Image (cartoon, rainbow, N blue to C red):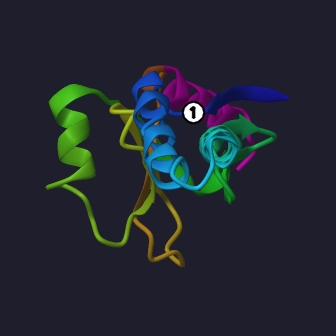
Amino acid sequence: MTTYRERLTASPWVFIATALVIPASLLVFLPISMLAGVVVAAVLYGGCLLLLTWGSPVIEVAGGVLSAGRARLPLTAVAQATAFRGEEATLERGRRLDARAWLLIRGWVSPVVKVQLDDPNDPTPYWILSSRRPEQLAAAIESAKAAVPA
């Protein structure tokens, strides 16, 4: 049973900024051919859109496991999950960040969840995950963790 699921898709401004590939490719290919310029611009922008949507990682809490992108973490290894917004989130991603931490952060998603690990064999002290709904993610991790037998 899935308790929480979120896809970290790019913000609209990222899609708009990526549209700059259209005039850039037109500038290069229009002197060769009008058709070539339009086709290359459409293909390049389409490829950018495909990469931004298809390549977006998914964060999921289901079946006693926290999945973040390709990484999997059993909830039995989680000590605590804490949500951060605003300046606190910026500090967690920056000055307070431990170099050994595992990160799944996206520049277009400011809030983060810090997932403290409780595994003496793992050198990673915690995970930092970007989330548009950090309080819901932290609550889902905590409730799913409580439901998993130790």
Q: From the viewer's perspective, tell me whether residue 55 is left or right of residue 89.
A: right
- Image quarter hosting the N terminus: top right
Queried whether the magenta region covers residue 128, the answer comes back as: no
Residue at figure coordinates x 43%, y 34% from the top left: 14
Q: Position of residue 106 (x, y in %)?
A: 43, 44
Q: Residues within 10 Å of mark 1 (few under 14, many from 20)?
A: some
- Quadrant of res 72: bottom right
Q: Position of residue 87 (x, y in %)?
A: 15, 32
Say what secondary structure mark 1 lies in: loop
Q: From the viewer's perspective, tell me whether residue 22 is left or right of residue 125.
A: right
Residue at figure coordinates x 45%, y 77% from the top left: 123
Relative to 102, is 15 above or below? above
Q: Nearer the viewer, residue 85 or 21?
A: 21
Residue at figure coordinates x 44%, y 70% from the top left: 124
Relative to 71, is 5 above or below? above
Which residues fall within the magenta stretch? 136-150
- Quadrant of res 135: top left
Q: Is residue 115 visible?
A: no
Q: Position of residue 5 (x, y in %)?
A: 68, 29
Amino acid under label 1?
Thr
Relative to 37, is 112 above or below? above
Residue at figure coordinates x 64%, y 52% from the top left: 69
Residue underneath mark 1: 9
Q: Position of residue 97 (x, y in %)?
A: 25, 58
Queried whether the magenta region covers residue 145, the answer comes back as: yes
